[in-house]
Amino acid sequence: MPRFDPHPARRPVVVTGASSGIGAAVAEAFASVGHPVLLGARRIDRLEELAQRIVREGGEARAVVLDLADPVSIARFSETAEAWTGGVEVLVSNAGDVQPIDTVGPHAEFARQLEVNLLGAQHLASELVPAMIGRGRGDVVFVTSEVAVRPRTHMAGYVASKAALEGFVAAMAMECEGTGVRVGMVRPGPVGTEQGSTWDGEDVAKVIDSWTRWGLMRHGGMLRPPEVADAVLAMATVPKGTRYALIEVQPEAPVSAEPAPLLALHHLDDSTEESA
């Protein structure tokens, strides 16, 4: 006889970085299928607007300020999360920050990005995941980035933090194996969000030029936040007995009038045979 419900229908969800972009889309996705969501981010006004919208649409939501660079804020947020939810069932660790700095750029900015993207994520997990293990169930989803495996120039802090985060998640998944807590990561490619909107125009031009030179901009396609949210929802709601360790989500290239290289080669072969 099992000592717990392996997958209750109503699962309280914590989403960090929920004030915009992927985090907001993730919160709306879980709320739309009946799960109460606790929203965390620094911009409490944006969180409250989202929480009110979710409630108007028939869902359950609460907004709580969270600064992942502040240990006190993380501890308070975690206490509120456990009290409001009665036990967190799903943690979506999505919050992140990216600023354009070089590998030999300002140390303070490099360290700050690691503090938010890596150390803050670990701190929050250390506050919430042990109780999941104690209950014998839960899902933890980390939103990483394709830069972890395909680094980009002029994003030193972001690249280092996301690469380290993926290593951390892999180790955590191993440690949680057999506990009933599933751990995985969703790795998005380019996404159209507010990240980068505060960059200086000269920095944007410098970064785009460098990425183009290194062949990192294959096409102009961009993911939309709800498309990444679909992957997060799928990872956390797959029936028990299955664990999605990694879902990488990439934008489809816009349809081009030019034939794809392989198709062009096929046409060349056909014309060669005809002329022969």
Image (cartoon, rainbow, N blue to C red):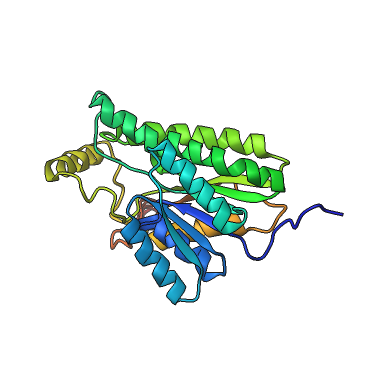
Q: Is residue 253 visible?
A: no
Between 22 and 268, which is closer to the camera in this rendering?
A: 22
Q: Is residue 189 visible?
A: yes
Q: Position of residue 251 (x, y in %)?
A: 39, 56
Q: In the figure, 197 relative to 116: above or below?
A: below
Residue in the image at 56% along x and 65% along y: 35
Left or right, 87 with respect to 226, comes to right
Q: Position of residue 21 (x, y in %)?
A: 36, 57
Q: Position of residue 57 (x, y in %)?
A: 45, 76
Residue in the image at 43% along x and 39% along y: 72
Left or right, 73 with respect to 243, comes to left
In the displayed orientation, state which residue is furthest to the left.
202
In the displayed orientation, state which residue is furthest to the bottom.
57
Between 159 and 43, which is closer to the camera in this rendering?
A: 43
Left or right, 133 with respect to 44, comes to right
Q: Position of residue 90 (x, y in %)?
A: 58, 53
Res 264 quadrant in image: bottom left
The N terminus is located in which quarter? bottom right
Q: In the figure, 160 relative to 12: above or below?
A: above
